Image: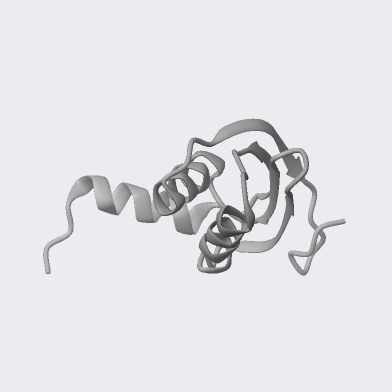
Amino acid sequence: MQLTKALLLHLKCFFMTDKFYCMTMRMKIDCNGCYKKIRRALLQMQELDSHFIDKQQGKVCVNGQFIPQDVAIKIGKRTNRRVEILEIKEVDVDNQGRPL
């Protein structure tokens, strides 16, 4: 299997990310089916530590060690929904890699 330069660069960025982020996104959540679709996509993503979905306001918050833009693109592709990033916060971590 031959790896392209773009894939190698992406893998390098993915494994080098040691920053812990909290990202808030806006998505259209019309019904319970939409909620389940978004939840299923979030649960399949291993780089996420936790998530919170607010159906009333249509907001999705995710926490973990990831590249924020890549996660937003993945969620949008897996759910076939438009994703708007509202806020990205970098969270400080302690020696064991847990958020403070």
- Look at the image and tell me in which quarter the C terminus lies: bottom right
The answer, for residue 11, to whether it is visible in the render is: yes
Q: Residue furthest front?
A: 31
95 to the left or right of 19: right
Identify the residue at image location x=77%, y=46%. Answer: 91
85 to the left or right of 78: right
100 to the left or right of 21: right
Residue 25's x, y, as percent?
64, 38
Instruction: Give the colour scheme of this rendering.
Output: one colour
| Marker count (numbered) | 0
Q: Nearer the viewer, residue 87 or 17?
A: 87
Identify the residue at image location x=49%, y=35%. Answer: 82
Residue 8's x, y, as percent?
28, 53
Q: Residue furthest left?
A: 2
**Placement of 21 over or under 93, stated as above or below:** above
Residue 71's x, y, as percent?
51, 48
Q: Nearer the viewer, residue 41 or 7?
A: 41
Residue 68's x, y, as percent?
56, 42
- Look at the image and tell me in which quarter the N terminus lies: bottom left
The answer, for residue 22, to whether it is visible in the render is: no
Identify the residue at image location x=65%, y=50%. Answer: 19
